Image: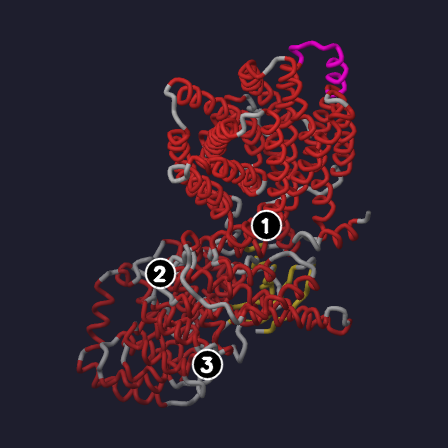
């Protein structure tokens, strides 16, 4: 069957992508065949053991199995490290096929103790084949993929279980118990064929990485080394304890169930009939439960809720025994055993396998084998000891055993809650920050104001000695004059520098260029100059000159006006002469205006503000005008808000204001920007969102109104959907090439804004990791980003965001968006539950 | 300032000619121009300054703002063939610690793929 046909068939049953169809199909059948074999092998094991060694000798079987499974773990860990995955699994299958035929032959010789060896072999088959199947799933899928597909894969196993149980019960009498074993090699050969085909499936990128990582260091695969590695990881330790606690609870509940059944049905045939019916119904119920709920719970409620369902129901059942009359005990036993088994076959198995997915590959497989094979067997042994002590020595009744069960369940719940947090952290560790905030990198690496001043100083050297001297003085005041800088600026610079600086540093014969000598370097010089500038007599003498120059509109006066503009900034605010700055702020020359703006930033007189604001619409002076207004500080926030809100104002002017408000860094600035965002004015929305994001990155203590932010995110999601519909419309039109590209770019910009807004109400670092990995990441990092968002965003929000992020063919993406668009209006911003709580 | 572009292997080479100074700006600054390219999806940008004679403080601000905008979108902006005098000033002001500056265009182009 072609991959396309498989996709069309399976996409009706499961949410999968075209490239996943073949792998999901093959794995489904692999698990199906493995579980049929398992459910044939299991009843043969019990039946033959009871026939040859009787129930009294069962503890020997438990003991042997628990002891030998440790050796099997060591061998499997070693093989996992040293042998290629497909070869390892294929060899194991061949081993089981060969030994099955051998057992069939040996059972004909009627050796009683052979059934003990077969018991261990059977346990080994169960645990190895299931673990190997989940290792293949881990090899192929990333967390979010697995979350979508795991329900489907588990249903393959459940169907296999039902089929195997039916085969065993129907054919046992006609074929004979031992002969049932011959069915299994044929099924396992089918698994071998699947392994052969699955070699061609593309694997996750991390396989190559892990192989590389593993090749670089000697393998430490002993059970002790694995145990140490598990202990070193909080996540894996929690996972191991969860598996162990789950196994202890299961064993204790099983014991309670068997006790109640034994007490209720004293007749052997009636008991066998009840157990047979119970198991068949249980498997069918588990299957229905699985196909109806597992996927829904995982997708809609997430891993945390899924992890809590089983312990919560078992806790309820264990408490209920204290209130149930004795006559209804069998109903209670059916409920608690049914709950435990049906959930462990369906939801619990799916969740447990999902928990392994984000574990780093260099430890994942060893840890999985160790936990699934050894820890679970060890826990079973531990529960046997608990039962032995509690029931045989202390003579506990059912209720007292329930108290023990309750204690274990409480520990289980606590660890389940704890592992959910660790799960999110483990997912995060798979998402690297791809790039640092460049603005911050520049601020950390260099002094931007100083850099600009150096350039101004050098430029002024060509224009005027007065301007140069004033810039030099300004530079000296910064106290950041390095020897290298002095060399560049100095008239007496050595020849090498002079040659390299050629035109810039070349002294133009007619202009006097001051030297940087010791006199100029004296700290008192700046103060002396400022004192002179503030002298009343100086004002009196210079008033006419300053007036005349600032009024002069000729081209020749440009340099003089720059000098005056600079000088006015060195004077005290409020002096009459500083009013000349108003004329200079209106000057057409960007160079004059730039000096005037810098001086205005120092004087901070309110009367200059309207003139400064006008420069926000001029590209040449916008940046210096923005800096000037930032220097005025928070007292002008109200004025800036008025300009921003005024739709009649120049659009470029309005667009420059959010950046100024952001750099003020106050809660009031954040509130004003948030309120402007609420107006949903498309023309300035980009600048407002970027300014809010800037505030968030620099001032994490600020708060942003969640309801308002969410409604803007919804608006942007809706806009993105429309862009996707347009993209789909024009996709096949040849003439639409450029338009298609524009729409795609617009979609990418909108996604960036969505994430900037999400950063306002969710942890900034998480959103940064997710966004960067969506933009630049591999398939793996994209999937991990989706998984991270799935765990921290509000479920509804994540649902609507998903089609914008997932790698989907355009048609399917548009189809999904169309479905979601109908419900998008209903999404109301509300408080977050628990872990996904925004941190505002 | 005159800007012309070429494209090689997904890298946008921006040939800048003239002076990058405040007084020469009409309606679109270098930073605004780079932002337009980023909006069109360009993420690898090489500014060729072979024919740039002069940069003032405004020009430096424009280069740095372009660098920030490009890097914050996960892109790369590099400079090539910058004049010795400008390079010296960049060195003194420590801009060379942040900006990647190359002498040779081919080497600069190759550097985009080495990362």
The residue sitting at 46% across, 68% down in the picture is A828
**Residue under circle 2?**
A699
Nearest-to-viewer mark from 1 and 3: 1
Which residue is depicted at the point 37% across and 72% down? Answer: A661
Q: Which residues are magenta?
A: A100-114
Given residues A303 and A103, the one toward you in this image is A103
Protein chain holding label 2: A
Foreground disc of the pair 2, 3: 2
Give a yes or no on whether discs 1 and 2 share a subunit: yes
Pointers 1 and 3 in contact (C-beta within 8 Å): no
Residue annotated with mark 3: A617
CA gap, disc 1 to disc 2?
40 Å
Residue located beneath label 1 in the image = A295
Compute the Cα span from label 1 to label 3.
55 Å
- Quarter location, residue A660: bottom left
Task: Count neighbours of disc 1 (C-alpha within 10 A) and say few if under 14, some if 14 to 19, many if 20 or more.
Answer: many
Q: Secondary structure at mark 2?
A: loop
Are the residues under marks 1 and 3 on the same chain? yes
Report which quarter residue A567 is drawn in.
bottom left
């Amino acid at each position: 069957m072609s991959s396309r046909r498989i996709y069309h068939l399976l996409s009706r049953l499961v949410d999968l992508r075209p490239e996943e169809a073949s792998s999901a199909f093959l794995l489904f059948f692999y698990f199906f065949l493995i579980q049929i074999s398992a459910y044939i092998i299991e009843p043969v094991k019990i039946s033959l053991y009871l026939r040859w060694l009787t129930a009294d000798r069962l503890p020997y079987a438990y003991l042997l199995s628990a002891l030998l499974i440790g050796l099997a773990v060591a061998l499997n860990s070693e093989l996992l490290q040293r042998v290629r995955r497909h070869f390892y699994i294929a060899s194991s299958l061949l081993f089981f096929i060969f030994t099955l035929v051998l057992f069939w032959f040996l059972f004909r010789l009627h050796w009683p103790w052979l059934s003990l060896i077969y018991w261990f072999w059977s346990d080994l088959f169960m645990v190895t084949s299931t673990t190997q199947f989940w290792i293949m799933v881990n090899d192929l899928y990333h967390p979010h993929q697995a979350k979508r597909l795991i329900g489907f894969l588990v249903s393959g196993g459940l169907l296999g279980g039902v089929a195997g149980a039916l085969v065993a019960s129907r054919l046992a009498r006609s074929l004979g118990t031992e002969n049932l074993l011959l069915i299994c090699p044929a099924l396992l050969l089918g698994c071998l064929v699947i392994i052969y085909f699955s070699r061609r499936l593309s694997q996750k990128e991390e396989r190559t990485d892990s192989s590389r990582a593993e090749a670089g260091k000697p393998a430490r695969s002993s059970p002790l080394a694995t145990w140490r590695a598990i202990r070193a990881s909080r996540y894996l330790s929690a996972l191991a304890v969860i598996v162990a606690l789950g196994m202890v609870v299961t064993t204790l509940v099983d014991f309670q169930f068997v006790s109640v059944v034994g007490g209720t049905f004293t007749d052997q045939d009636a008991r066998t009939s009840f157990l047979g019916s119970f198991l068949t119904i249980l498997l069918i119920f588990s299957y229905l439960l699985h196909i109806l709920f597992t996927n829904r719970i995982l997708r809609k409620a997430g891993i945390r809720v899924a992890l809590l369902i089983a312990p919560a129901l078992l806790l309820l059942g264990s408490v209920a025994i204290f209130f149930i009359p004795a006559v209804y005990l069998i109903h209670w036993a059916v409920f608690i055993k049914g709950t435990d088994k049906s959930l462990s076959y369906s939801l619990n198995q799916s969740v447990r396998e999902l928990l392994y997915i984000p574990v780093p590959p260099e430890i994942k497989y060893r840890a999985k084998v160790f936990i699934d094979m050894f820890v679970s067997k060890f826990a079973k042994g531990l529960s046997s000891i608990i039962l032995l002590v509690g029931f045989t020595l202390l003579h506990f009744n059912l209720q007292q055993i329930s108290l023990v069960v309750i204690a274990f369940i409480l520990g289980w719940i606590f660890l389940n809650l704890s592992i959910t947090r660790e799960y999110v952290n483990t997912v995060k560790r798979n998402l690297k920050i791809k790039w640092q905030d460049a603005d911050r990198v520049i601020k950390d690496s260099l002094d931007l104001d100083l850099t600009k001043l150096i350039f101004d100083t050098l430029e002024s050297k060509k224009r005027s000695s007065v301007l140069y001297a004033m810039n030099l003085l300004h530079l000296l005041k910064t106290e950041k004059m390095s020897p290298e800088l002095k060399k560049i600026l100095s008239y007496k610079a050595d020849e090498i520098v002079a040659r390299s600086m050629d035109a810039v540093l070349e002294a133009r014969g007619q202009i006097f260029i001051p030297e940087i000598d010791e006199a100029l370097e004296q700290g008192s010089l700046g103060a002396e100059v400022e004192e002179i500038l503030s002298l009343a007599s100086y004002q009196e003498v210079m008033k006419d000159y300053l007036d005349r120059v600032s009024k002069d509109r000729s081209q020749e006066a440009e340099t003089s006006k720059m000098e005056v503009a600079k000088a006015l900034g060195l004077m005290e605010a409020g002096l009459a002469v500083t009013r000349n700055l108003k004329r200079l702020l209106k000057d057409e020359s960007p160079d004059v205006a730039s000096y005037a703006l810098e001086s205005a930033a120092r004087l901070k007189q309110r009367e200059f503000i309207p003139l400064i604001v006008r420069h926000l619409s001029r590209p040449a002076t916008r940046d210096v005008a923005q800096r000037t207004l930032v220097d005025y500080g928070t007292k002008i926030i109200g004025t800036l808000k008025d300009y921003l809100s005024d739709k009649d104002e120049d659009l470029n002017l309005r667009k420059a204001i959010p950046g100024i408000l952001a750099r003020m860094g106050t809660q009031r600035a954040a509130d004003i920007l948030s309120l402007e965002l609420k107006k949903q004015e498309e023309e300035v929305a980009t600048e407002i969102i970027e300014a809010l994001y800037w505030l968030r990155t620099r001032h994490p203590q600020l708060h942003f109104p969640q309801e308002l932010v969410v409604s803007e995110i919804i608006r942007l999601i809706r806009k993105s959907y429309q862009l996707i519909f347009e993209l789909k419309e024009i996709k096949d039109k040849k003439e639409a090439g450029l338009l298609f590209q524009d729409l795609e770019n617009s979609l990418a910009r909108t996604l960036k804004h969505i994430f900037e807004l999400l950063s306002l109400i969710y942890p900034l670092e998480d959103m940064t990791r997710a966004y960067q990995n969506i933009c630049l990441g591999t398939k793996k990092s994209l999937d991990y980003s989706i998984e991270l968002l799935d765990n921290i965003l509000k479920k509804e929000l994540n649902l609507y965001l998903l089609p914008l992020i997932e790698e989907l063919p355009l048609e399917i993406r548009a189809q999904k968006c169309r479905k979601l668009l109908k419900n998008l209006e209903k999404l109301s911003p509300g408080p977050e539950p628990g872990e996904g709580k925004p941190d505002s | 300032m005159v800007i012309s572009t070429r494209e090689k292997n997904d890298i946008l080479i921006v040939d800048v000619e003239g002076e990058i100074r405040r007084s020469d700006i009409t309606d679109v600054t270098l930073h605004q121009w780079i932002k337009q390219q980023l909006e069109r999806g360009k993420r690898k940008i090489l500014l060729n300054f072979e024919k740039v004679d002069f940069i003032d403080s405004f020009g430096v601000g424009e280069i740095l703002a372009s660098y920030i905008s490009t890097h914050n979108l996960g892109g790369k902006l590099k400079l090539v063939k910058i004049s010795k005098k400008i390079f010296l000033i960049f060195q003194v002001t420590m801009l060379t610690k942040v900006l990647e500056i190359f002498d040779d265009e081919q080497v600069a182009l190759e550097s985009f793929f080495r990362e």
